[in-house]
Amino acid sequence: MKRPLYLALVTLILASCSVERDVQKLFERDENAKLSQPVKASELARLGSRAIPPLQMALRSNKARRRELALAALGRLKATSALDSMAALRSDPAPEVRRALALAMGEIGGPKARTIALELLSDNDAAVRAGAIWSLGTIGTPSEIRAVLTTFKRGPKVVYQMAVWALARLCKGRVPNELVDLLDGESTELRVATVELLDLLGHAAARSRVESTALSDSEEDDVRRLALIFLGRHGDFGSLRVFLRFSLASVDEVRMTVYYGLGLRKGSLAAAALLLRGLDEPDEWRRDVVTQTLIELVGKDFRSEKKAYRSFLLGTAAKRITAEGHDERQLDALAARALLGDDQALTRLFALAPTLDRRHLAAVLEVALHAPTKKPKDEALARLAATLPKGALRSLFESLSQSDAAKDLPRLVSLGLRSADAAIVKPALAAFRRSTSAIESTWLDALEIPTRRPELTPSVVQALLAVGRSKAARLVSLLDKKLKRSKDKDQRELYLTLVAQLDPRAESAEAILLRELQRGPDEIRRIVLTLARGFGRKLGLARAALRYLDSENTRLAAAALLLLKAATGKNHPKNDKEAWEKELAAP
């Protein structure tokens, strides 16, 4: 026998009232939860779909916590019927409510939920934007990638972290150009997140940009370390130059990341050859890490026996090298043997260099800088560099400027110093500063730079002072010859500056300045008197300055007075020549 219709309605009404009471009780319990756990949205959702109407009513509550809980519960219930009521809270004054709305859209799904999540991407609160990104990562389509990328750029860290996860799901291997461009972003955290995302996407096509990011002088170590991991997973032979560049890094964390990244280069003999350096780490723990990485990379357990690994790698590399060709495997094998001291392998790499693309050529040049060759490689490298295109030459000198190899490559350094390209001259000067075997022609090449590039004069002075102080007498003698022949004011000023600063105590330096003071003209005399203030109490120059106190050239007279004050420690008037003469005559 069927129940009458009115009884069914009464039953339904009573059940609804019961659910409303249960919802109300849970809200009240949450508000009084000082001594117990706050109510979770899942508890409200367990009441089932009949809780949707009272939860919708709670969206109009004047209590932010109730609105937040109601949104979260409606999301759990996938309450598509409540979307309009929920959307009304897009401008709620409480950010936690807007965040709950953003997250609920990801649980409900559908076109309308995606639209609401997209609108919340422009919210002023970072946590709300992160919630919207999570939702779009869960229910979005590739058409939302651009909007998420735009929000990704804004940051902060909570947004970066969520966007990395969401974009990895949305992009599915397809990487928009805008993402790669974020490697040049202003924020370190943005660049860190970008490298992480590119790594997750396995975007090997971005390796060139990641390499440039890692090699940048201004880059933070956190970004550099992630870039090294990316290149370990997705790099090729051309990426080897980055690992070589930082294999001797002074920062322990960067160096250890180099070893970790090399361990990811499965099948690379050059990576294994470079890893051998890690067996010389002073810290036992680091040596153990390198040893384990080597074992996993080459599949042989020689513990920390460097000779055994070297012998194995040389033999394995020899089997890969054929008479012709230069594919990735052959280049890798040749590089491995070159890094292990095989001069013939290095010669073969030099012969292949002109046929390689820019990145692979840069890697070969980096290998050449690091290879422990028995034969002099300065002349061979200089000959090779003379044939390189400008981009490759810049890359070579950027590497050289950060390598201790510069100290044994004066001819190569000279080639860079003679360049008309400032982008080559600057790193060549930095390499020159590292040089301990600079030859006279290299110094002369450096001295000629200001005639082509006057803006580099301060850098030239700093480099020559850094290199020349240990060989001051030799360089002062060279500068003296240049001074005698030169009539150009700017050149003479440069030479005089170097003479005065290389070794102010030297008798030869004082004699050169005295000669130039007599030789003139007035502008050179002023320069000499100014430089002579750095000579302390050497009075020969101070006595010579007396005659210029009453010069009609006011700048020259002022320079003479300042020199006299510096040499004697006194402060007589300029026109009191007699007082100055007494000071200089005193023992």
Image (cartoon, rainbow, N blue to C red):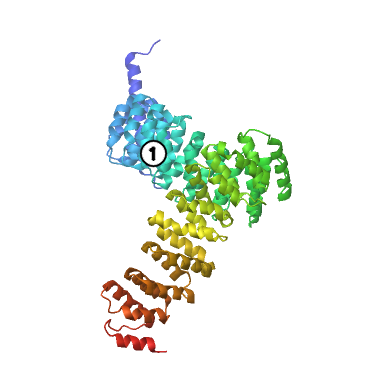
Give the residue furthest to the front.
Answer: 485
Q: Position of residue 153 (x, y in %)?
A: 37, 40
Q: Quadrant of residue 281?
A: bottom right
Q: Position of residue 341 (x, y in %)?
A: 67, 48
Residue at x 38% of width, y 88% of height = 585
Point out the image quarter for the N terminus: top left
Residue at x 71% of width, y 36% of height = 319
Image position of 177 with respect to 306: above or below: above
Let me know if residue 73 appears in the view. Answer: no
Residue at x 59% of width, y 56% of height = 408
Report which residue position mark 1 lands on. 152
Please name whichever residue, 441 or 135, is drawn nearer the observer in this view of the structure: 441
Q: Quadrant of residue 232?
A: top right
Image position of 159 with respect to 466: above or below: above
Please name whichever residue, 457 or 19, is drawn nearer the observer in this view of the structure: 457
Point out the image quarter for the C terminus: bottom left
Please name whichever residue, 458 or 281, is drawn nearer the observer in this view of the structure: 458
Let me know if residue 331 appears in the view. Answer: yes
- How many residues crowd around disc 1 within 10 Å: few (fewer than 14), some, or many (20 or more)? many
Q: Amino acid at mark 1?
A: Phe
Image position of 220 with respect to 237: above or below: below
Q: Position of residue 198 (x, y in %)?
A: 48, 37
